[in-house]
Image: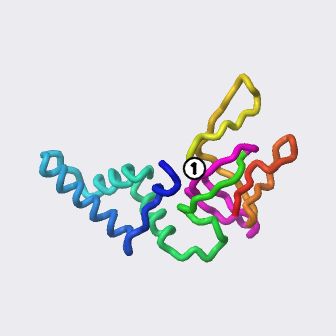
Amino acid sequence: MTMTDRKAPLPADPIQSYKQQAKRLRETLSAENRPVSHGEALELVARQHGFRDWNSLSASALKRALPRNAEPGFAVGTIISGRYLGQAFTGEIRSVTALADGEHYRLAIHFDEPVDVVTFESFSAFRQRVHATVNSKGISPQHTSNGLPHLVISL
């Protein structure tokens, strides 16, 4: 999946669109003599879109549909790039939490391609989803042993 085909534009009412998908799925499965409840159909639609459940999908759809006037670049669904543990990445913000200090944000980021987080040549450990704290400039306060920030997001 490339960055250009990752997120289609949201319909005017994304939640209603997903509910219509669930209704069509329910009708199709019922016609095949495999009836499911509306709740089960919503869960299946969420999984088809890469979310663990309906609540996660609907929350993401609502956040993507709302104006992004908080911090630029720190909204669910935003495509970002930067460096994680010295490795270049592109990915998507999956969750954002403003921390109590008012200066930092906790982000969950899903990388397009897994990043090797080990620098030892005969061993690798790949991560595709990470949680990190950053300031409003997209730089983590935590540093590696060589003094570089764990995460730097290009804003």
Nearest the eye: 31 or 85: 85
Residue 5 in percent (x, y) is at: 46, 56
Q: Which residue is pictured at 17% across the width and 45% down the height?
A: 34
Q: Which residue is pictured at 76% across the width and 48% down the height?
A: 150
Residue 92 in percent (x, y) is at: 57, 55
Q: Which residue is mark 1?
A: 110
Residues in magenta, as a range: 85-109
Horizontal side, residue 60 vs residue 120: left or right:
left
Residue 16 in percent (x, y) is at: 33, 69
Nearest the eye: 36 or 32: 32
Residue sticking out furthest to the top: 122
Say how the picture is coloured.
rainbow
Q: Which residue is pictured at 74% across the width and 26% down the height?
A: 121
Say which quadrant the C terminus sits in: bottom right
**Label 1 environment density (alpha carbons within 10 Å; few <14, some 14–19, many ≥20):** many
- Determine the secondary structure under disc 1: strand
Amino acid type, mark 1: His
Q: Quick check: is 137 in the magenta stretch?
A: no
Up the image or down, 59 lies above or below 12; here it is above
Horizontal side, residue 88 vs residue 38: left or right:
right
Up the image or down, 30 lies above or below 13; here it is above
State the predominant SS element of the stretch in magenta. Answer: strand
Horizontal side, residue 117 vs residue 49: left or right:
right
Number of residue marks: 1
Up the image or down, 139 lies above or below 73; here it is above
